[in-house]
Amino acid sequence: MRRDCFTLTAIVGLFAAVAGVAQEKTLHYPETRKGEVVDDYHGVKVADPYRWLEDDVRKSDAVARWVQAENTVTRAYLDAIPQRNAIEKRITNLWNYEKFSAPFQAGGQYFFFKNNGLQNQSVLYVQDTLDAEARVLLDPNSWTKDGTIALAGLQVSDCGKYIAYGVAEAGSDWNTWKVLDVATATPLSDELKWVKFSGASWTPDSKGFFYSRFPAPASAETFQATNENMRLYYHRLGSPQSEDVLVYVPAQPKWTVGAVVTEDGRYLIIDIGDGTTSRKSRIVYKDLLEPYGLPTDLIPNHDDKYQFLGNDGPVFYFKTEWHAPKGQIITIDTRHPAPQNWKTIVPEAKETLENVSFVGNILVCEYLQDAKTAVKMYTPNGHFIRDLKLPGIGTASGFGGKRTDTETFYTFTSFTTPPSIYRYDLLTGQNKLLRQAKVKFDPSQYIVQQVFYPSKDGTRIPMFLAHKKNIPLDGRNPTLLYGYGGFNISLTPGFSISRIQWMEMGGVLAVANLRGGGEYGEEWHRAGTKLKKQNVFDDFIAAAEWLIAEKYTSPQKLAIQGGSNGGLLVGACLTQRPDLYGACLPAVGVMDMLRFQRFTAGRYCGRLRFQRQRR
Protein backbone atom coordinates (compact mmCIF):
# COMPACT_ATOMS: atom_id res chain seq x y z
CA MET A 1 0.00 0.00 0.00
CA ARG A 2 2.91 2.34 0.73
CA ARG A 3 3.84 2.63 -2.95
CA ASP A 4 0.29 3.75 -3.81
CA CYS A 5 0.25 6.64 -1.31
CA PHE A 6 1.53 9.05 -3.94
CA THR A 7 -1.16 7.84 -6.30
CA LEU A 8 -3.84 8.40 -3.66
CA THR A 9 -2.64 11.95 -3.10
CA ALA A 10 -2.59 12.59 -6.84
CA ILE A 11 -6.04 11.19 -7.51
CA VAL A 12 -7.60 13.12 -4.62
CA GLY A 13 -6.02 16.38 -5.78
CA LEU A 14 -6.95 15.85 -9.42
CA PHE A 15 -10.49 14.86 -8.51
CA ALA A 16 -10.87 18.04 -6.49
CA ALA A 17 -9.44 20.18 -9.27
CA VAL A 18 -11.38 18.86 -12.26
CA ALA A 19 -14.55 17.51 -10.67
CA GLY A 20 -15.57 20.82 -9.16
CA VAL A 21 -14.95 20.20 -5.45
CA ALA A 22 -15.12 23.53 -3.68
CA GLN A 23 -12.35 24.80 -1.42
CA GLU A 24 -13.25 27.65 0.91
CA LYS A 25 -9.75 28.81 1.79
CA THR A 26 -7.42 30.71 -0.53
CA LEU A 27 -4.01 29.13 -0.78
CA HIS A 28 -1.16 31.21 0.62
CA TYR A 29 2.21 29.88 -0.47
CA PRO A 30 5.33 30.67 1.56
CA GLU A 31 7.82 33.15 0.15
CA THR A 32 10.73 31.52 -1.69
CA ARG A 33 14.07 33.25 -1.35
CA LYS A 34 15.76 34.30 -4.60
CA GLY A 35 19.51 34.28 -5.09
CA GLU A 36 21.75 36.17 -7.48
CA VAL A 37 23.21 33.25 -9.45
CA VAL A 38 23.67 33.88 -13.18
CA ASP A 39 25.37 31.37 -15.49
CA ASP A 40 27.02 32.11 -18.81
CA TYR A 41 26.32 29.48 -21.48
CA HIS A 42 28.40 30.35 -24.52
CA GLY A 43 27.66 34.03 -24.09
CA VAL A 44 24.01 33.60 -23.08
CA LYS A 45 23.26 34.80 -19.54
CA VAL A 46 20.83 32.52 -17.70
CA ALA A 47 19.59 33.51 -14.24
CA ASP A 48 19.08 30.71 -11.72
CA PRO A 49 17.67 32.40 -8.59
CA TYR A 50 16.64 29.13 -6.97
CA ARG A 51 20.03 27.41 -7.19
CA TRP A 52 20.10 27.12 -3.40
CA LEU A 53 17.25 24.59 -3.60
CA GLU A 54 19.66 22.11 -5.22
CA ASP A 55 21.26 21.54 -1.82
CA ASP A 56 20.64 18.14 -0.26
CA VAL A 57 17.54 18.34 1.95
CA ARG A 58 19.28 16.02 4.43
CA LYS A 59 22.10 18.53 4.89
CA SER A 60 20.51 21.94 4.33
CA ASP A 61 18.21 23.30 7.05
CA ALA A 62 17.02 26.03 4.67
CA VAL A 63 15.91 23.54 2.02
CA ALA A 64 14.31 21.30 4.66
CA ARG A 65 12.31 24.25 6.04
CA TRP A 66 11.16 25.23 2.52
CA VAL A 67 10.01 21.68 1.76
CA GLN A 68 8.15 21.48 5.05
CA ALA A 69 6.40 24.81 4.42
CA GLU A 70 5.32 23.72 0.93
CA ASN A 71 4.09 20.38 2.29
CA THR A 72 2.06 22.15 4.95
CA VAL A 73 0.17 24.12 2.30
CA THR A 74 -0.41 21.04 0.16
CA ARG A 75 -1.46 18.85 3.07
CA ALA A 76 -3.98 21.42 4.28
CA TYR A 77 -5.56 21.60 0.81
CA LEU A 78 -5.78 17.84 0.35
CA ASP A 79 -7.07 17.16 3.86
CA ALA A 80 -9.91 19.62 3.33
CA ILE A 81 -11.34 17.80 0.29
CA PRO A 82 -14.70 16.35 1.42
CA GLN A 83 -14.36 13.19 -0.68
CA ARG A 84 -10.88 12.32 0.55
CA ASN A 85 -11.89 9.81 3.24
CA ALA A 86 -14.24 7.98 0.90
CA ILE A 87 -11.58 7.84 -1.84
CA GLU A 88 -8.97 6.58 0.61
CA LYS A 89 -11.29 3.89 1.93
CA ARG A 90 -12.23 2.67 -1.55
CA ILE A 91 -8.69 2.67 -2.95
CA THR A 92 -7.49 0.74 0.13
CA ASN A 93 -10.26 -1.80 -0.39
CA LEU A 94 -9.43 -2.11 -4.08
CA TRP A 95 -5.72 -2.53 -3.40
CA ASN A 96 -6.33 -5.34 -0.93
CA TYR A 97 -6.08 -8.30 -3.29
CA GLU A 98 -3.54 -11.08 -3.76
CA LYS A 99 -0.88 -10.26 -6.34
CA PHE A 100 1.26 -12.89 -8.03
CA SER A 101 4.15 -12.79 -10.48
CA ALA A 102 4.50 -15.33 -13.26
CA PRO A 103 6.52 -18.31 -11.98
CA PHE A 104 9.95 -19.20 -13.29
CA GLN A 105 11.85 -22.48 -13.09
CA ALA A 106 15.35 -23.31 -11.88
CA GLY A 107 16.77 -26.64 -10.75
CA GLY A 108 13.39 -28.34 -11.08
CA GLN A 109 11.70 -25.86 -8.73
CA TYR A 110 9.26 -23.03 -9.38
CA PHE A 111 9.86 -19.56 -7.94
CA PHE A 112 7.32 -16.74 -7.79
CA PHE A 113 6.43 -13.55 -5.94
CA LYS A 114 3.23 -13.07 -3.98
CA ASN A 115 1.73 -10.12 -2.09
CA ASN A 116 -1.18 -11.02 0.18
CA GLY A 117 -2.88 -7.68 -0.40
CA LEU A 118 -1.55 -4.68 1.48
CA GLN A 119 2.03 -5.75 2.07
CA ASN A 120 4.57 -3.07 1.25
CA GLN A 121 6.66 -5.53 -0.75
CA SER A 122 6.04 -8.84 -2.45
CA VAL A 123 7.43 -12.03 -0.94
CA LEU A 124 9.48 -14.65 -2.83
CA TYR A 125 8.18 -18.25 -2.65
CA VAL A 126 9.39 -21.60 -3.99
CA GLN A 127 7.49 -24.85 -4.72
CA ASP A 128 8.47 -28.23 -6.11
CA THR A 129 5.57 -28.37 -8.60
CA LEU A 130 2.89 -25.90 -9.66
CA ASP A 131 0.39 -27.75 -7.45
CA ALA A 132 2.67 -28.23 -4.44
CA GLU A 133 2.58 -26.14 -1.28
CA ALA A 134 4.82 -23.10 -1.53
CA ARG A 135 7.23 -21.92 1.15
CA VAL A 136 8.67 -18.48 1.84
CA LEU A 137 12.23 -17.79 0.75
CA LEU A 138 12.64 -14.01 1.02
CA ASP A 139 10.29 -11.63 2.82
CA PRO A 140 11.61 -8.06 2.49
CA ASN A 141 8.81 -6.87 4.78
CA SER A 142 10.60 -8.52 7.69
CA TRP A 143 13.87 -6.67 7.10
CA THR A 144 12.74 -3.44 8.76
CA LYS A 145 9.68 -2.13 10.56
CA ASP A 146 9.34 1.04 8.49
CA GLY A 147 9.58 -0.68 5.09
CA THR A 148 12.59 1.33 3.94
CA ILE A 149 14.70 -1.69 2.94
CA ALA A 150 13.67 -3.32 -0.33
CA LEU A 151 14.56 -6.24 -2.56
CA ALA A 152 16.41 -4.89 -5.58
CA GLY A 153 16.83 -7.75 -8.03
CA LEU A 154 17.70 -11.43 -7.81
CA GLN A 155 19.11 -14.31 -9.83
CA VAL A 156 18.72 -18.01 -9.07
CA SER A 157 21.62 -20.34 -9.83
CA ASP A 158 21.05 -22.93 -12.57
CA CYS A 159 20.89 -25.77 -10.04
CA GLY A 160 18.31 -23.89 -7.98
CA LYS A 161 20.46 -24.13 -4.84
CA TYR A 162 21.38 -20.47 -4.40
CA ILE A 163 19.89 -17.03 -4.97
CA ALA A 164 21.95 -13.89 -5.41
CA TYR A 165 19.82 -10.88 -4.43
CA GLY A 166 20.18 -7.13 -4.03
CA VAL A 167 19.10 -5.04 -1.05
CA ALA A 168 18.32 -1.31 -1.36
CA GLU A 169 17.97 1.01 1.61
CA ALA A 170 15.78 4.12 1.76
CA GLY A 171 15.08 4.13 -1.96
CA SER A 172 18.74 4.42 -2.92
CA ASP A 173 20.07 3.07 -6.23
CA TRP A 174 23.03 1.73 -4.27
CA ASN A 175 22.51 -1.97 -3.58
CA THR A 176 24.21 -4.52 -1.34
CA TRP A 177 24.13 -8.00 -2.87
CA LYS A 178 23.88 -11.14 -0.77
CA VAL A 179 23.39 -14.88 -1.31
CA LEU A 180 20.62 -17.13 0.02
CA ASP A 181 20.69 -20.89 0.49
CA VAL A 182 17.37 -22.07 -1.01
CA ALA A 183 17.11 -25.31 0.99
CA THR A 184 17.37 -23.55 4.36
CA ALA A 185 16.16 -20.05 3.33
CA THR A 186 19.13 -18.57 5.20
CA PRO A 187 21.62 -15.94 3.97
CA LEU A 188 25.25 -16.92 3.50
CA SER A 189 28.18 -14.76 4.56
CA ASP A 190 28.65 -13.18 1.10
CA GLU A 191 28.12 -9.39 0.97
CA LEU A 192 28.91 -7.20 -2.06
CA LYS A 193 28.70 -3.41 -1.70
CA TRP A 194 28.62 -0.42 -4.07
CA VAL A 195 26.57 -2.22 -6.66
CA LYS A 196 24.33 -0.07 -8.82
CA PHE A 197 22.47 -0.79 -12.09
CA SER A 198 23.68 -4.38 -12.13
CA GLY A 199 22.28 -7.89 -12.06
CA ALA A 200 24.09 -11.16 -11.43
CA SER A 201 24.92 -14.03 -13.80
CA TRP A 202 25.87 -17.40 -12.31
CA THR A 203 28.33 -19.84 -13.81
CA PRO A 204 26.74 -23.28 -14.51
CA ASP A 205 28.70 -24.87 -11.65
CA SER A 206 26.96 -22.45 -9.22
CA LYS A 207 30.31 -21.66 -7.59
CA GLY A 208 30.01 -17.93 -8.25
CA PHE A 209 28.59 -15.18 -10.40
CA PHE A 210 29.55 -12.10 -12.42
CA TYR A 211 28.34 -8.64 -11.39
CA SER A 212 29.23 -4.97 -11.90
CA ARG A 213 29.99 -2.29 -9.35
CA PHE A 214 31.47 1.17 -8.90
CA PRO A 215 34.36 2.23 -6.67
CA ALA A 216 33.22 3.22 -3.20
CA PRO A 217 32.32 6.95 -3.31
CA ALA A 218 33.62 9.48 -0.83
CA SER A 219 31.27 9.57 2.15
CA ALA A 220 30.22 13.15 1.45
CA GLU A 221 29.26 12.28 -2.16
CA THR A 222 27.38 8.99 -1.63
CA PHE A 223 24.02 10.36 -2.78
CA GLN A 224 25.08 13.11 -5.21
CA ALA A 225 28.26 12.13 -7.05
CA THR A 226 28.03 11.10 -10.68
CA ASN A 227 28.62 7.39 -11.24
CA GLU A 228 31.82 6.63 -13.14
CA ASN A 229 34.37 3.83 -13.52
CA MET A 230 31.92 0.91 -13.46
CA ARG A 231 33.75 -2.44 -13.60
CA LEU A 232 32.87 -6.10 -14.07
CA TYR A 233 33.86 -8.63 -11.38
CA TYR A 234 33.54 -12.33 -10.63
CA HIS A 235 32.56 -13.31 -7.09
CA ARG A 236 33.23 -16.83 -5.77
CA LEU A 237 30.86 -18.01 -3.04
CA GLY A 238 32.28 -17.86 0.46
CA SER A 239 35.06 -15.40 -0.35
CA PRO A 240 35.22 -11.73 0.75
CA GLN A 241 34.50 -9.02 -1.81
CA SER A 242 38.12 -7.88 -1.61
CA GLU A 243 39.09 -11.13 -3.37
CA ASP A 244 36.64 -10.72 -6.27
CA VAL A 245 38.32 -11.07 -9.64
CA LEU A 246 38.36 -7.98 -11.87
CA VAL A 247 37.17 -9.23 -15.26
CA TYR A 248 36.71 -6.17 -17.44
CA VAL A 249 37.32 -2.42 -17.29
CA PRO A 250 35.55 -0.24 -19.91
CA ALA A 251 37.83 2.06 -21.86
CA GLN A 252 35.95 5.20 -20.80
CA PRO A 253 34.96 6.10 -17.18
CA LYS A 254 31.37 6.96 -18.14
CA TRP A 255 30.70 3.70 -19.95
CA THR A 256 28.63 1.02 -18.22
CA VAL A 257 29.23 -2.73 -18.20
CA GLY A 258 27.18 -5.87 -17.62
CA ALA A 259 27.58 -9.54 -18.46
CA VAL A 260 25.71 -12.81 -18.93
CA VAL A 261 26.96 -16.38 -19.07
CA THR A 262 25.67 -18.43 -22.01
CA GLU A 263 23.39 -21.36 -21.16
CA ASP A 264 26.05 -23.87 -22.20
CA GLY A 265 28.49 -22.18 -19.80
CA ARG A 266 31.09 -21.70 -22.52
CA TYR A 267 31.07 -17.93 -23.01
CA LEU A 268 30.75 -14.73 -21.04
CA ILE A 269 28.96 -12.06 -23.07
CA ILE A 270 30.02 -8.58 -21.95
CA ASP A 271 27.79 -5.62 -22.83
CA ILE A 272 29.42 -2.17 -22.66
CA GLY A 273 26.97 0.73 -22.73
CA ASP A 274 27.85 4.22 -23.89
CA GLY A 275 26.83 5.86 -20.62
CA THR A 276 23.45 7.15 -21.75
CA THR A 277 19.92 5.75 -21.89
CA SER A 278 20.33 5.13 -25.63
CA ARG A 279 21.25 1.50 -24.75
CA LYS A 280 23.78 1.35 -27.59
CA SER A 281 26.23 -1.44 -26.92
CA ARG A 282 29.68 -2.68 -27.62
CA ILE A 283 29.80 -6.47 -27.32
CA VAL A 284 32.84 -8.36 -26.04
CA TYR A 285 32.99 -12.07 -25.25
CA LYS A 286 35.31 -14.31 -23.27
CA ASP A 287 35.76 -18.07 -23.63
CA LEU A 288 35.36 -19.37 -20.06
CA LEU A 289 37.07 -22.65 -20.94
CA GLU A 290 40.29 -20.70 -21.52
CA PRO A 291 41.16 -19.27 -18.07
CA TYR A 292 44.00 -17.15 -19.43
CA GLY A 293 42.19 -16.07 -22.59
CA LEU A 294 41.55 -12.36 -23.03
CA PRO A 295 38.12 -10.84 -23.84
CA THR A 296 37.56 -10.58 -27.58
CA ASP A 297 35.84 -7.68 -29.31
CA LEU A 298 32.82 -8.78 -31.32
CA ILE A 299 30.99 -5.48 -31.90
CA PRO A 300 33.63 -2.81 -31.18
CA ASN A 301 31.60 0.37 -31.66
CA HIS A 302 28.55 1.92 -30.02
CA ASP A 303 26.79 2.07 -33.38
CA ASP A 304 23.52 0.36 -32.43
CA LYS A 305 21.57 -1.73 -29.92
CA TYR A 306 22.36 -5.41 -29.43
CA GLN A 307 20.54 -7.74 -27.03
CA PHE A 308 22.15 -11.15 -26.61
CA LEU A 309 19.58 -13.95 -26.88
CA GLY A 310 21.54 -17.22 -26.87
CA ASN A 311 24.05 -19.26 -28.79
CA ASP A 312 24.61 -22.43 -30.77
CA GLY A 313 28.25 -22.99 -29.91
CA PRO A 314 30.26 -20.16 -31.52
CA VAL A 315 27.15 -18.74 -33.28
CA PHE A 316 25.51 -15.94 -31.24
CA TYR A 317 21.92 -14.70 -31.59
CA PHE A 318 21.13 -11.02 -31.12
CA LYS A 319 18.08 -8.79 -31.25
CA THR A 320 19.27 -5.58 -32.85
CA GLU A 321 18.24 -2.42 -34.66
CA TRP A 322 21.29 -2.62 -36.94
CA HIS A 323 19.91 -1.62 -40.36
CA ALA A 324 16.43 -2.25 -38.89
CA PRO A 325 15.00 0.63 -36.79
CA LYS A 326 12.05 -1.52 -35.65
CA GLY A 327 14.22 -4.47 -34.71
CA GLN A 328 15.34 -7.80 -36.15
CA ILE A 329 17.08 -11.00 -35.06
CA ILE A 330 20.52 -11.82 -36.45
CA THR A 331 23.26 -14.39 -35.88
CA ILE A 332 26.98 -13.68 -35.71
CA ASP A 333 29.44 -16.53 -36.16
CA THR A 334 32.41 -15.64 -33.95
CA ARG A 335 34.70 -17.49 -36.36
CA HIS A 336 33.67 -15.07 -39.11
CA PRO A 337 32.58 -11.95 -37.15
CA ALA A 338 32.73 -9.30 -39.90
CA PRO A 339 29.33 -7.57 -40.46
CA GLN A 340 29.16 -8.78 -44.06
CA ASN A 341 28.89 -12.31 -42.64
CA TRP A 342 26.02 -11.57 -40.25
CA LYS A 343 22.80 -13.43 -41.04
CA THR A 344 19.26 -12.13 -40.60
CA ILE A 345 17.06 -14.78 -38.98
CA VAL A 346 13.86 -12.81 -38.31
CA PRO A 347 13.74 -9.67 -40.49
CA GLU A 348 12.34 -6.29 -39.52
CA ALA A 349 8.54 -6.19 -39.55
CA LYS A 350 5.96 -3.43 -39.74
CA GLU A 351 5.51 -3.72 -35.98
CA THR A 352 8.21 -2.84 -33.45
CA LEU A 353 10.08 -5.85 -32.05
CA GLU A 354 10.19 -5.02 -28.35
CA ASN A 355 11.53 -8.18 -26.75
CA VAL A 356 12.66 -11.71 -27.63
CA SER A 357 12.94 -14.83 -25.46
CA PHE A 358 14.85 -17.92 -26.60
CA VAL A 359 12.94 -20.63 -24.75
CA GLY A 360 12.08 -24.21 -25.69
CA ASN A 361 14.28 -23.74 -28.76
CA ILE A 362 11.73 -21.20 -29.99
CA LEU A 363 12.27 -17.48 -30.59
CA VAL A 364 9.28 -15.91 -28.82
CA CYS A 365 8.96 -12.41 -30.28
CA GLU A 366 6.94 -9.71 -28.52
CA TYR A 367 5.89 -7.01 -30.98
CA LEU A 368 4.21 -3.67 -30.41
CA GLN A 369 1.26 -3.40 -32.76
CA ASP A 370 0.09 0.20 -32.34
CA ALA A 371 1.37 0.17 -28.72
CA LYS A 372 -0.30 -3.14 -27.75
CA THR A 373 1.30 -6.58 -27.58
CA ALA A 374 1.32 -9.12 -30.41
CA VAL A 375 3.35 -12.34 -29.99
CA LYS A 376 4.85 -14.38 -32.84
CA MET A 377 7.02 -17.50 -32.63
CA TYR A 378 9.85 -18.64 -34.90
CA THR A 379 12.32 -21.50 -35.15
CA PRO A 380 16.05 -20.80 -34.65
CA ASN A 381 16.27 -20.73 -38.46
CA GLY A 382 13.62 -18.01 -38.66
CA HIS A 383 10.67 -20.10 -39.87
CA PHE A 384 7.32 -18.85 -38.59
CA ILE A 385 5.58 -21.27 -36.20
CA ARG A 386 2.45 -19.57 -34.84
CA ASP A 387 0.87 -16.49 -33.30
CA LEU A 388 -0.12 -16.40 -29.66
CA LYS A 389 -3.75 -15.32 -29.33
CA LEU A 390 -4.20 -12.78 -26.54
CA PRO A 391 -7.47 -11.92 -24.75
CA GLY A 392 -7.72 -8.38 -26.16
CA ILE A 393 -6.11 -4.93 -26.12
CA GLY A 394 -3.36 -5.24 -23.56
CA THR A 395 0.21 -6.06 -22.64
CA ALA A 396 1.81 -9.49 -22.36
CA SER A 397 5.19 -9.97 -20.72
CA GLY A 398 7.36 -12.75 -19.36
CA PHE A 399 8.09 -15.80 -21.57
CA GLY A 400 11.16 -16.69 -19.55
CA GLY A 401 13.01 -19.98 -19.55
CA LYS A 402 15.82 -21.94 -21.13
CA ARG A 403 16.36 -23.59 -24.52
CA THR A 404 15.61 -26.98 -22.96
CA ASP A 405 12.28 -26.02 -21.36
CA THR A 406 8.94 -27.20 -22.72
CA GLU A 407 6.84 -24.56 -20.97
CA THR A 408 6.91 -20.85 -20.34
CA PHE A 409 4.80 -18.40 -18.36
CA TYR A 410 3.54 -14.92 -19.08
CA THR A 411 1.32 -12.22 -17.62
CA PHE A 412 -1.44 -10.42 -19.52
CA THR A 413 -2.93 -7.16 -18.30
CA SER A 414 -4.95 -4.22 -19.57
CA PHE A 415 -6.57 -1.07 -18.22
CA THR A 416 -9.58 -3.10 -17.03
CA THR A 417 -8.02 -6.59 -16.90
CA PRO A 418 -6.22 -7.46 -13.65
CA PRO A 419 -2.89 -9.30 -14.04
CA SER A 420 -3.63 -12.76 -15.46
CA ILE A 421 -0.93 -15.45 -15.44
CA TYR A 422 -0.82 -18.08 -18.18
CA ARG A 423 1.15 -21.28 -18.67
CA TYR A 424 2.04 -21.85 -22.31
CA ASP A 425 2.99 -25.32 -23.62
CA LEU A 426 5.70 -24.74 -26.20
CA LEU A 427 5.23 -28.17 -27.78
CA THR A 428 1.46 -28.13 -28.27
CA GLY A 429 0.70 -24.40 -28.25
CA GLN A 430 -1.84 -24.93 -25.48
CA ASN A 431 -2.58 -21.87 -23.35
CA LYS A 432 -3.83 -22.29 -19.77
CA LEU A 433 -4.88 -19.58 -17.31
CA LEU A 434 -3.17 -20.35 -14.00
CA ARG A 435 -4.58 -17.51 -11.94
CA GLN A 436 -6.10 -14.05 -12.28
CA ALA A 437 -5.99 -11.36 -9.63
CA LYS A 438 -9.34 -11.03 -7.86
CA VAL A 439 -9.97 -7.30 -7.66
CA LYS A 440 -13.22 -6.03 -6.14
CA PHE A 441 -14.65 -4.32 -9.22
CA ASP A 442 -16.72 -5.31 -12.25
CA PRO A 443 -14.67 -5.03 -15.48
CA SER A 444 -17.76 -5.59 -17.62
CA GLN A 445 -18.91 -2.07 -16.76
CA TYR A 446 -15.96 -0.50 -18.61
CA ILE A 447 -14.72 -0.17 -22.14
CA VAL A 448 -11.18 0.09 -23.52
CA GLN A 449 -10.60 1.46 -26.99
CA GLN A 450 -7.85 2.92 -29.11
CA VAL A 451 -8.22 6.08 -31.17
CA PHE A 452 -5.87 7.99 -33.45
CA TYR A 453 -5.60 11.77 -33.76
CA PRO A 454 -3.45 14.19 -35.80
CA SER A 455 -0.67 16.16 -34.14
CA LYS A 456 0.25 19.71 -35.13
CA ASP A 457 2.34 18.53 -38.10
CA GLY A 458 -0.23 15.91 -39.15
CA THR A 459 1.53 12.89 -37.60
CA ARG A 460 -0.94 10.16 -36.62
CA ILE A 461 -0.76 9.59 -32.85
CA PRO A 462 -2.41 6.64 -31.04
CA MET A 463 -4.22 7.08 -27.74
CA PHE A 464 -5.94 4.62 -25.40
CA LEU A 465 -9.24 5.54 -23.77
CA ALA A 466 -10.81 3.68 -20.83
CA HIS A 467 -14.02 4.63 -19.02
CA LYS A 468 -17.45 3.44 -18.00
CA LYS A 469 -19.68 2.29 -20.82
CA ASN A 470 -22.17 4.72 -22.39
CA ILE A 471 -20.79 7.91 -20.90
CA PRO A 472 -22.37 11.06 -22.34
CA LEU A 473 -20.13 12.98 -24.74
CA ASP A 474 -21.26 16.34 -23.40
CA GLY A 475 -17.87 17.83 -22.52
CA ARG A 476 -18.42 17.40 -18.80
CA ASN A 477 -16.49 14.22 -17.97
CA PRO A 478 -13.49 14.65 -15.63
CA THR A 479 -10.61 13.36 -17.75
CA LEU A 480 -7.07 12.38 -16.84
CA LEU A 481 -4.59 12.57 -19.74
CA TYR A 482 -1.30 10.77 -19.11
CA GLY A 483 1.89 10.95 -21.18
CA TYR A 484 5.64 10.39 -21.17
CA GLY A 485 7.21 10.70 -24.62
CA GLY A 486 10.87 9.95 -24.10
CA PHE A 487 13.82 7.59 -23.78
CA ASN A 488 12.35 5.00 -26.15
CA ILE A 489 9.85 3.97 -23.45
CA SER A 490 6.50 2.72 -24.71
CA LEU A 491 3.23 3.26 -22.84
CA THR A 492 1.27 0.05 -23.19
CA PRO A 493 -2.05 -0.89 -21.55
CA GLY A 494 -1.63 -1.85 -17.90
CA PHE A 495 -3.73 -2.37 -14.81
CA SER A 496 -3.73 0.29 -12.10
CA ILE A 497 -5.86 0.46 -8.96
CA SER A 498 -5.75 4.26 -8.89
CA ARG A 499 -6.97 4.38 -12.48
CA ILE A 500 -9.81 1.97 -11.68
CA GLN A 501 -10.75 4.29 -8.82
CA TRP A 502 -10.67 7.25 -11.20
CA MET A 503 -12.98 5.52 -13.68
CA GLU A 504 -15.33 4.35 -10.92
CA MET A 505 -15.84 7.97 -9.94
CA GLY A 506 -16.88 8.73 -13.52
CA GLY A 507 -13.50 9.81 -14.86
CA VAL A 508 -12.14 9.14 -18.33
CA LEU A 509 -8.58 7.81 -18.61
CA ALA A 510 -6.59 8.81 -21.69
CA VAL A 511 -3.04 7.55 -22.36
CA ALA A 512 -1.32 9.14 -25.36
CA ASN A 513 1.55 7.39 -27.16
CA LEU A 514 3.73 10.38 -27.98
CA ARG A 515 6.80 10.62 -30.15
CA GLY A 516 9.98 10.14 -28.16
CA GLY A 517 8.70 6.76 -26.97
CA GLY A 518 9.42 3.40 -28.53
CA GLU A 519 5.97 2.51 -29.87
CA TYR A 520 7.05 2.63 -33.52
CA GLY A 521 10.77 1.98 -33.25
CA GLU A 522 13.88 4.13 -33.28
CA GLU A 523 12.62 6.67 -35.83
CA TRP A 524 9.60 7.39 -33.61
CA HIS A 525 11.93 7.75 -30.65
CA ARG A 526 14.30 10.14 -32.39
CA ALA A 527 11.37 12.23 -33.64
CA GLY A 528 10.90 13.36 -30.03
CA THR A 529 14.49 14.06 -28.98
CA LYS A 530 16.92 16.98 -29.00
CA LEU A 531 15.88 19.69 -31.48
CA LYS A 532 12.68 17.71 -32.21
CA LYS A 533 11.57 17.64 -28.55
CA GLN A 534 8.80 20.14 -29.32
CA ASN A 535 7.06 17.35 -31.25
CA VAL A 536 6.39 15.62 -27.93
CA PHE A 537 4.71 18.69 -26.48
CA ASP A 538 2.72 19.22 -29.68
CA ASP A 539 1.52 15.60 -29.58
CA PHE A 540 0.31 15.98 -26.00
CA ILE A 541 -1.36 19.32 -26.65
CA ALA A 542 -3.09 17.81 -29.68
CA ALA A 543 -4.37 14.96 -27.50
CA ALA A 544 -5.93 17.48 -25.14
CA GLU A 545 -7.47 19.37 -28.05
CA TRP A 546 -8.90 16.14 -29.49
CA LEU A 547 -10.50 15.14 -26.18
CA ILE A 548 -12.13 18.56 -25.95
CA ALA A 549 -13.23 18.66 -29.60
CA GLU A 550 -14.77 15.17 -29.34
CA LYS A 551 -16.76 16.28 -26.27
CA TYR A 552 -15.14 13.85 -23.86
CA THR A 553 -14.25 16.77 -21.63
CA SER A 554 -13.58 20.50 -21.42
CA PRO A 555 -10.54 22.53 -20.33
CA GLN A 556 -12.01 22.98 -16.85
CA LYS A 557 -12.47 19.20 -16.51
CA LEU A 558 -9.15 18.08 -18.02
CA ALA A 559 -6.12 17.11 -15.92
CA ILE A 560 -2.70 16.18 -17.35
CA GLN A 561 -0.18 13.97 -15.57
CA GLY A 562 3.37 12.74 -16.11
CA GLY A 563 6.44 11.83 -14.07
CA SER A 564 10.17 12.40 -14.53
CA ASN A 565 10.51 13.02 -18.29
CA GLY A 566 6.70 13.08 -18.23
CA GLY A 567 6.95 15.78 -15.57
CA LEU A 568 8.98 17.84 -18.02
CA LEU A 569 6.22 17.17 -20.57
CA VAL A 570 3.50 18.44 -18.24
CA GLY A 571 5.57 21.46 -17.23
CA ALA A 572 6.18 22.46 -20.85
CA CYS A 573 2.54 21.99 -21.87
CA LEU A 574 1.35 23.92 -18.83
CA THR A 575 3.65 26.77 -19.86
CA GLN A 576 2.75 26.71 -23.54
CA ARG A 577 -1.01 26.08 -23.32
CA PRO A 578 -2.32 26.90 -19.82
CA ASP A 579 -5.80 27.46 -21.29
CA LEU A 580 -6.26 23.74 -22.01
CA TYR A 581 -6.19 22.27 -18.50
CA GLY A 582 -7.98 22.50 -15.19
CA ALA A 583 -5.20 20.71 -13.28
CA CYS A 584 -1.59 19.70 -13.95
CA LEU A 585 0.57 17.17 -12.11
CA PRO A 586 4.25 17.31 -13.19
CA ALA A 587 5.55 14.64 -10.79
CA VAL A 588 9.31 14.66 -10.09
CA GLY A 589 9.75 16.58 -13.32
CA VAL A 590 13.15 16.89 -15.01
CA MET A 591 12.67 20.62 -15.43
CA ASP A 592 16.16 22.12 -15.51
CA MET A 593 17.53 20.98 -18.83
CA LEU A 594 20.81 22.82 -18.27
CA ARG A 595 21.86 21.15 -15.02
CA PHE A 596 20.06 17.84 -14.43
CA GLN A 597 22.98 15.85 -15.84
CA ARG A 598 25.15 17.03 -12.94
CA PHE A 599 23.45 14.91 -10.32
CA THR A 600 23.41 11.15 -9.51
CA ALA A 601 22.24 9.19 -12.58
CA GLY A 602 21.21 12.26 -14.55
CA ARG A 603 24.28 12.00 -16.75
CA TYR A 604 22.93 8.78 -18.30
CA CYS A 605 20.30 10.96 -19.95
CA GLY A 606 22.69 13.74 -20.87
CA ARG A 607 23.05 12.98 -24.57
CA LEU A 608 19.29 12.80 -25.02
CA ARG A 609 18.39 16.18 -23.58
CA PHE A 610 17.18 18.64 -26.10
CA GLN A 611 19.26 21.71 -26.81
CA ARG A 612 18.02 25.10 -25.84
CA GLN A 613 17.79 27.57 -28.68
CA ARG A 614 17.90 31.34 -28.62
CA ARG A 615 14.46 32.79 -29.13
Image (spheres, rainbow, N blue to C red):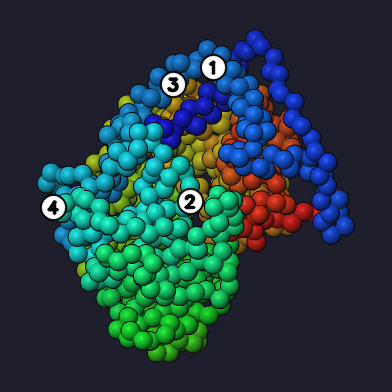
Q: Quadrant of residue 530?
A: bottom right
Residue at the spot x=13%, y=44% of the render?
133
Residue highlighted by disc 4: 128
Q: Is residue 209 visible?
A: no
Gap in angstroms between the C-alphas marked 1 and 4: 49 Å
Question: In the picture shown, does residue 539 fall above or below 528?
Answer: above
Residue closer to the observer: 44 or 548: 44
Question: In the rendered structure, which amino acid carries the disc numbered 4?
Answer: Asp
Residue at the spot x=21%, y=44% of the render?
136
* Residue 173: image tag: 2
Q: Position of residue 251 (x, y in %)?
A: 56, 76
Gap in angstroms between the C-alphas marked 2 and 3: 30 Å
Q: Is disc 2 in contact with disc 3, using a CB cutoff of under 8 Å?
A: no
Q: Secondary structure at mark 3?
A: helix
Of mark 1 and mark 4, the one earlier in the sequence is 1
* Residue 88: image tag: 3
Of mark 4 and mark 2, the one earlier in the sequence is 4
Question: In the rendered structure, which amino acid carries the disc numbered 1?
Answer: Asp
